[in-house]
Image: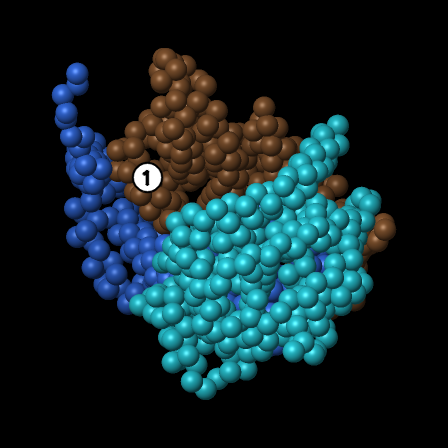
């Protein structure tokens, strides 16, 4: 069975602005992601993990290399195969929650049975009571739950999530993380999840792809051998701390490099 | 590559080119339309006629007389508006109760076209500058008082509490927190107030007056004498732009310090 | 320790102040005011109905003024939104043309009032034109500003779900634009009213301006005040209506 996603020697160059030199965001990344796997992209700020996610999902074309989803090379968005969940709510503010679902499914070209389908997805995150609310009436946590529900409603094999819980408080993160794990166990979706939280990565992922500071390369891939659905109790096990420490060791130098680079850039601007 | 920098430069030059093009087309259009007599010269005199009228106008005593009246009227009206606005705004803005009580009233009054009351001012103060001073002062008062209230009411209570906890006296709190905190908003109100005062003085002079720039424009229209009317309009427009740029500049400098 | 005294309620303060001022006006007008120029509120209220309905020509002028205001406003919104969309559609269009709009916005249009009368005559056309010219600019400004604010994140998200250009236009760009047109509506109404009133007052041979002049010259201050009061209330009502429309269409924004 071919991997769900194959990343083949992807590099990404960003043209420098106003005379600055070009920046290499990603340097020759190769990666296989299997069906039903939960993979975390973990790395310091600016290491290109979000860029990689966008390339996988077909929102950005890589400077070199390519991505294949299943058997298909990625040349643009794949609405039937890949769903995104972004860091901020991308619910359209001028539509109610239910209207948002209708429109999203319309984008995907799914018109029949949208109502039941949407309400079912909302129930799976416990938000069906808010179907007729406008997004502005909901808290950030509620909006992100609904964002996730929409990702589910789109019924794709792959879910790409870009730091979806970053704006939430710790407790909500744990609850939603658990929901995600349950979802994975139930549906067998493939999930690629970007984060810079070590604990979150270890708690959720089957494999953690640790990335270097810019230019982003794959530093190491750590396996987390624990079946889904996982509960937050996993955090109490010694194995959890071991893996977490392992990730920290790998990341420590990368974080230092990133902070030093930021300091340099700031001093250069001030001087 | 310098691709990004080049793209920026190209964008700016295209923008400038289009803007220049618009000005050229408008001016060229003006020349063409008027020289081909496609439009009644009463509605749009030619650039030469306007330039000529402009030249003739600016050397007459009447011209400077009118400008003087308008300038004087605007200055006095503005002074009254600013004084009343800042004093009232300060006392109201300092107190949350008074702010809650009076701010909606003042905002509501400002929402009514105050121009409606101009005939009353003429009835009470006559055709002279007095009615325009009163009218301009009233109109300009509102943005000043509303912005002053907003400025003082908007000073972060957290800053005040922090200063008091450090032992600041009321005067010190005023000087170091209230005034600097409110200053940018108040300043913006002063700028808006100026233009509203200026425009309402002009308006008043146009509607009912025996002197001033507004009256001059209306007078030339009465005489069906377009070139001098257009000359006056050009003067007013240029003066407005110049004043706007100057005041914006002053505001930016004042806020930065 | 200060005794806990409840500060007076703002609403109470407000209404007592207003009541006090009205009483002051009544007393001052009756005792000190020259009846040729000054009228107390009681006289104004008594003159209200006879003024509005006593002279059919005046009623007609009031009605005409109302029609002029509404017409100018509607035209300003349609033209302003169209022009604003055209300007704001492209980055180049916006960068090159928007500065001109802002420049026009800051000018005292009242200097052009006599010119408008020359061009459009002494009748309703010049009033509508002048009102239009005042109201169209804020709509253009808010429409263009609003178009800038189309969220790139929403666009990415829609693309990822397979939205076509037409769908993006309909579900994301268009609602953003409509929202921005609506933020300018109230200001446009205020300015349109200003333009129409200025033009009406300027022309003393017919319309409202005729009557303000008559009442002033025949020393009928109560009628003059009453006329102004009617117009002021009309203005407030129109503003509130626009405000209602705006909040209805913006109810998704509120909280």
Within-10-Å neighbours for mark 1: few <14, some 14–19, many 20+: some
The image quadrant where one finds the C terminus of chain C is bottom left
* Colour chain C appears in: blue
x, y percentage for residue A166?
50, 50
**Nearer the observer, A155 or B197:** A155
The residue at 30%/29% (across/down) is B95
At horizontal 34% and vertical 66% (from top left) the residue drawn is A126
Horizontal and vertical percent for residue A156?
A: 54, 75
Query: Tag 1, which secondary structure?
Result: helix
Q: Dot 1 corresponds to which residue?
A: B103
Residue at the front extreme?
A238
Identify the image quadrant of the N terminus of chain C: top left
Question: Which residue is at 62% across, 54% downward?
Answer: A222
Chain B colour is brown
From the viewer's side, name the closer residue of B124 and A102. Answer: A102
Q: Residue at x 19, y 36 (%)?
A: C9
Does residue B194 appear anywhere in the picture? no
């Amino acid at each position: 069975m071919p991997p769900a996603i194959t990343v083949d020697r992807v590099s990404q160059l960003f043209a420098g602005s106003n005379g600055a030199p070009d920046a290499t965001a990603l340097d020759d990344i190769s990666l296989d992601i299997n069906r039903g796997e939960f993979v975390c992209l973990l790395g310091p700020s600016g290491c290109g993990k979000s860029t990689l996610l966008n390339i996988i999902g077909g929102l950005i074309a890589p400077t070199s290399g390519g991505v294949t989803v299943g058997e298909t090379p990625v040349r643009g968005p794949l609405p039937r195969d890949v769903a995104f969940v972004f860091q901020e709510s991308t619910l359209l503010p001028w539509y109610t929650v239910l209207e948002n679902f209708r429109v999203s499914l319309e984008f995907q070209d799914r018109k029949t049975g949208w109502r039941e389908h949407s309400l079912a997805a909302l129930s799976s995150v416990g938000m069906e009571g808010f179907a007729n609310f406008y997004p502005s009436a909901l808290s950030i946590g509620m909006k992100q739950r609904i964002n996730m529900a929409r990702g589910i409603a789109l019924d794709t094999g792959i879910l790409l999530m870009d730091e979806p819980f970053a704006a939430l408080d710790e407790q909500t993160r744990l609850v939603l993380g658990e929901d995600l794990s349950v979802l994975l166990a139930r549906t067998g979706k493939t999930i690629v999840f970007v984060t810079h939280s070590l604990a979150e990565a270890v708690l959720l992922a089957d494999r953690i792809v640790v990335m270097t500071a810019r230019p982003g390369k794959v530093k190491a891939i750590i396996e987390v051998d624990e079946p889904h659905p996982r509960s937050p109790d996993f955090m109490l096990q010694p194995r959890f701390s071991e893996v977490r420490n392992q990730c920290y060791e790998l990341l420590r130098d990368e974080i230092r490099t990133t902070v030093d680079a930021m300091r340099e850039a700031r001093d250069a601007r001030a001087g | 590559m310098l691709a990004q920098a080049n793209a920026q430069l190209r964008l700016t030059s295209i923008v400038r080119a289009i803007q220049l093009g618009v000005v050229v087309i408008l001016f060229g259009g003006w020349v063409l339309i008027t020289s081909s007599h496609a439009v009644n010269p009463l509605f749009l005199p030619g650039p030469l006629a306007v330039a000529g009228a402009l030249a003739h106008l600016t050397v007459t005593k009447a011209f400077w007389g009118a400008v003087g009246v308008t300038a004087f009227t605007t200055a006095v009206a503005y002074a009254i508006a600013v004084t009343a606005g800042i004093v009232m705004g300060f006392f109201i803005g300092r107190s949350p109760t008074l702010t809650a009580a009076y701010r909606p009233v003042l905002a509501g009054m400002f929402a009514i076209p105050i121009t409606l009351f101009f005939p009353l001012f003429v009835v009470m103060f006559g055709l002279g500058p007095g009615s325009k001073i009163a009218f301009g002062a009233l109109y300009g008062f509102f943005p000043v008082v509303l912005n002053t209230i907003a400025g003082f009411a908007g000073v972060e209570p957290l800053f005040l509490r922090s200063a008091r906890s450090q032992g600041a006296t009321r005067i010190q709190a005023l000087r170091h927190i209230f005034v600097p905190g409110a200053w940018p908003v108040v300043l913006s109100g002063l700028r808006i107030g100026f233009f509203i005062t200026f425009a309402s003085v002009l308006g008043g002079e146009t509607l009912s007056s025996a002197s001033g720039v507004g009256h001059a424009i209306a007078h030339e229209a009465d005489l069906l004498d377009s070139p001098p009317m257009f000359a006056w309009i050009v003067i007013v427009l240029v003066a407005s732009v110049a004043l706007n740029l100057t005041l914006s500049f002053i505001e930016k400098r004042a806020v930065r310090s | 320790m200060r005794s806990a005294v409840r500060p007076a309620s703002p609403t109470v303060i407000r209404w007592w102040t207003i009541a006090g001022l009205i009483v002051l006006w009544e007393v001052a007008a009756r005792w000190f005011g020259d009846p040729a120029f000054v009228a107390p509120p009681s006289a104004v209220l008594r003159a209200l109905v006879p003024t509005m309905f006593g002279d059919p020509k005046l009623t007609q002028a009031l009605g005409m003024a109302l029609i002029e205001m509404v017409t100018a406003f509607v035209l300003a919104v349609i033209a302003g939104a169209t022009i604003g969309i055209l300007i704001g559609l492209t980055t180049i269009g916006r960068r090159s043309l928007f500065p001109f709009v802002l420049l026009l916005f800051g000018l005292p249009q009242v200097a052009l009032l006599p010119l408008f009368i020359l061009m459009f005559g002494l009748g309703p056309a010049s009033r509508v034109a002048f009102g239009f010219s005042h109201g169209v600019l804020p709509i253009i400004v808010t429409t263009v500003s609003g178009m800038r604010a189309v969220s790139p994140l929403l666009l990415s998200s829609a693309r990822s779900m397979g939205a076509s250009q037409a769908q993006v236009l309909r579900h994301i760009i268009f609602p953003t634009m409509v929202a921005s047109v609506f933020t300018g509506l109230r200001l446009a109404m205020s300015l349109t009213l200003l333009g129409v009133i200025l033009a009406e007052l300027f022309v003393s041979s017919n319309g409202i301006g005729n009557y303000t002049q008559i009442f002033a010259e025949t020393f009928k201050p109560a009628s003059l005040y009453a006329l102004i009061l009617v117009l002021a209330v009309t203005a407030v009502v129109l503003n509130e209506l626009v405000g209602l429309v705006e909040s209805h269409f913006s109810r998704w924004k509120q909280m």
